[in-house]
């Protein structure tokens, strides 16, 4: 069971939660994971295994088979309103799988694109994988929050006096935000787009 503990501990680290915290979340005894780590627990019930897998969005079999979990699930949102913490947004359309290696590099969500301002790179109906981060490099495609509006996907271009949010579609005008407006609106970066998922 030590191998099972190691996999669960790795998933806990990705979520910034301790095994003790996970035990509280799932209603397990506070000593369960300690006993699992020390091999005093020789088996884990299917019910508990399923609860752990569901919490992390992984397949239960991946926890007990050799090797790391094959994929990690992230929620796909249809909209991300400004001012509401991600975990409180209820508009979840489904889930997308990302690799454990990618999951280990930060916190991730997915967003279903509406509109054509980023075509042909990102099209209406595409799903983008976003690493949650408050800043990005000039040239990155980001998801930004403008004032009280919902999230928008654009390429960011930074200048000393402000930033541009630049669409790919020439039918749309770039939006410029002087430094003073960035704080006043506010303009905030939700995260950087790291992957695109497109289904035909």
Image (spheres, rainbow, N blue to C red):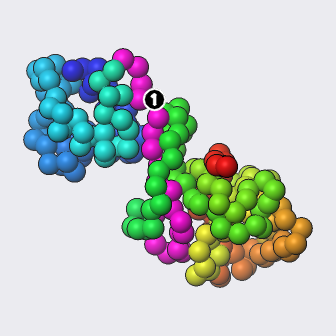
Q: Position of residue 134 (x, y in %)?
A: 59, 59
The number of numbered discs placed on residues in the rendered structure image is 1
* Nearer to the camera, 40 or 128: 128
Q: Where is residue 178 in the image (x, y as percent from the top left)?
A: 78, 76
> For numbered disc 1, what is the local secondary structure?
loop
Tell me if residue 170 comes above or below residue 2 in the rendering: below
Query: Which quadrant of the structure image shows residue 163?
Result: bottom right
Q: Is residue 81 magenta?
A: yes
Query: Which quadrant of the structure image shows residue 116?
Result: bottom right
Tell me the crowding category of disc 1: few under 14, some 14 to 19, or many 20 or more residues within 10 angstroms, Cα based. some
Residue drawn at 41 percent across, 68 percent down: 90
Tell me if residue 47 comes above or below residue 119 in the rendering: above
Query: Which quadrant of the structure image shows residue 92?
Result: bottom left
* Nearer to the camera, 64 or 18: 64
Q: Where is residue 73 in the image (x, y as percent from the top left)?
A: 45, 44
Residue 160 in view (yes/no): no
Residue drawn at 77 percent across, 67 percent down: 117
Residue 13 placement, left or right of 51? right
Tell me if residue 122 comes above or below residue 99 in the rendering: below
Residue 54 placement, left or right of 110? left
Q: In which quarter of the image is the N terminus?
A: top left
Q: Main secondary structure of the magenta part?
A: loop
Residue drawn at 14 percent across, 23 percent down: 43
Residue lying farthest to the front in this orientation = 200
Q: Where is residue 189 in the image (x, y as percent from the top left)?
A: 63, 63
Q: Name the residue under label 1.
A: 70
Residue drawn at 47 percent across, 35 percent down: 71
Residue 73 in view (yes/no): yes
Residue 16 placement, left or right of 46? right
Q: Does the magenta stretch include residue 176?
A: no
Residue 40 placement, left or right of 145? left
Q: Give the range drawn in magenta.
A: 66-86
């Amino acid at each position: 069971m030590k191998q099972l503990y190691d996999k669960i501990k790795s998933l806990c680290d990705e979520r910034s939660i301790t095994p003790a915290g996970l035990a509280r979340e799932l209603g397990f005894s506070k000593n369960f994971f300690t006993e699992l780590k020390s091999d005093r627990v020789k088996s884990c019930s299917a019910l508990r295994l399923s609860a752990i897998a569901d919490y992390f969005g992984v397949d239960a079999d991946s926890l007990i088979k050799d090797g790391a979990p094959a994929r990690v699930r992230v929620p796909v949102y249809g909209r991300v309103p400004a001012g509401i913490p991600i975990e409180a947004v209820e508009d979840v359309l489904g889930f997308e799988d990302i690799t454990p290696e990618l999951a280990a590099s930060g916190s991730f969500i997915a967003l279903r694109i509406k509109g054509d301002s980023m075509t042909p790179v990102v099209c209406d109906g595409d799903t983008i994988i976003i690493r949650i981060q408050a800043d990005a490099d000039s040239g990155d495609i980001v998801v930004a929050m403008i004032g009280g509006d919902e999230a928008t996907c654009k390429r960011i271009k930074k200048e000393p006096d402000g930033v541009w949010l630049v669409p790919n579609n020439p039918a749309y005008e770039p939006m410029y935000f002087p430094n003073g407006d960035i704080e006043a609106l506010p303009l905030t970066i939700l995260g950087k787009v790291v992957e695109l998922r497109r289904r035909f």
